[in-house]
Amino acid sequence: MAIRSSIILGTGSYAPERILTNEELSQKIETSDEWIRSRSGIRERHIAAPGEATSDMAVQAGRRALADAGLTPEDIDLLVVATVTPDMTLPACACIIQHKLGVPTHAACFDLNAACSGFIYGLDTASAMIQSGRYKKALVIGVDKLSAIVDWNDRNTCVLFGDGAGAVVLGGSDQPDTGVLGAKLGAYGDSVNLLCVPAGGSSNPATAEAIAAGDLFMKMKGKEVFKLAVRAMDEAARDILEQHGFHSDQIALVIPHQANLRIIDAVASYLKLPMDRFVVNVDRYGNTSAASVPLALDEARKAGRIKPGDITLLVAFGAGLTYGSALIRW
Ligand code: UT7
């Protein structure tokens, strides 16, 4: 039986203890705190400990979201994990997380790869499954350990990324017009080469030559990604507002993907919204890919920036290039 709404029952997040500052990076590669801060807004990022896998970070965030919701892992019958850095290529990271967290074996568990838009893709997918009435409680986790796939000698990329996890618990409600109101998802598949890990997949397996060429690391054309990102985020935000008949003024808080402060600035000016309506934590975490939006969402909630009845806009873009936006009424 279909139920009306998918609502957020709890949120949680986790970032590894180790903080890597711009200053430290500038001692290892040719860069500077000034360059990184002025071009991206990033001051520092968190880096997973040796042996700390994507699943370990996800478990921490998942536990916190469940505690916040007053639920236990046994209550979960759907686990969706958005990540581009699973523990292994096979099987799904969701199955590893299921086991570590103690989610029951009758729960559906799967991964989803939409890079930095992954959490919004996961939120929309899980919400539709909750709204169908076929699943009761979903745990949606956005998690990435980008430190495992960046080339620490490539200053064009390594200064921008960090590790972390964020999670939400979803449940059904008969109250109409509340919770996840809707989402707008899309992708520009013609721009795959702007941001990718060229080898390690079926088209270019992880041979000794591919490893030696550095093709198992992330490659990015930053300038092109920047331009597409601003356009995609602006359009995704406008589309979802229009679909639901909202003016940007009615949005209490925007939770954008934390890739670059200048991208967030540009989106704010296109939407004609002041920066204080945007959650910004890119300075402390860098770009944590699929973890970025749920981590910012959790921080905003815990800081009391979201009140009952508020409408929150989530918006992101990422490798693919994918984009996504979602509206939540609290
Ligand atoms: O989730 C999606 C992930 N990706 C993104 O969001 C990336 C989007 N793009 C960006 O955020 C920006 O394009 C960057 C931060 C990557 C770069 O900023 P930019 O203002 O577009 O700089 P640029 O690429 O035009 O580089 C300017 C200069 C270059 O030198 P030349 O060619 O002008 O002499 C780079 O070699 O800065 C140099 N550079 C650096 N210098 C010091 C590049 N990286 C660094 C660095 N430190 N880390």
Image: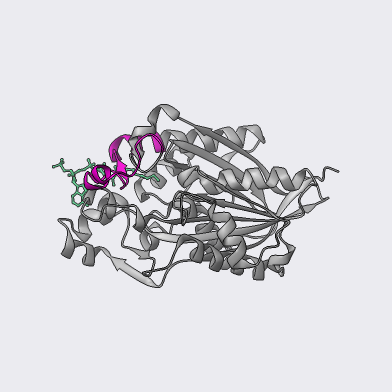
Figure quarter occupied by ligand 1:
top left
**329 and 212: which one is in front?**
212
User: On screen, 67 above or below 37?
Assistant: below
Q: Is residue 221 magenta?
A: yes
Q: Is residue 289 visible?
A: yes
User: Toward which corner of the image does residue 146 lie, by quadrant?
Assistant: bottom left
Give the image location of residue 38, x and y in percent. Answer: 26, 53
- Judged from this view, the residue extending furthest toward the right is 1
Magenta part of the chain: 202-229
Residue 231, picture quadrant: top left
Q: Which residue appears at 77% of the width and 52% of the height?
A: 172
Q: Nearer the viewer, residue 308 or 15?
A: 15
- Which residue appears at 70% of the width and 55% of the height? 107
| Residue 25 locus on image (x, y percent) | 22, 62
Percent across and percent down for residue 216 are: 31, 46
Residue 253 appears in view: no
Q: Residue furthest top?
A: 190
Please, is residue 324 above or below residue 10 in the view? above
Taking the spot 56% from the left edge, 46% from the top edge, the residue there is 120
Is 220 on the left-hand or right-hand side of 102? left
Q: Nearer the viewer, residue 114 or 105?
A: 105
Q: Quadrant of residue 321?
A: top left
Which quadrant of the rendered structure holds the N terminus? top right
Asked whether residue 330 is drawn in magenta, I would say no
The single residue placed furthest to the bottom in the displayed view is: 17
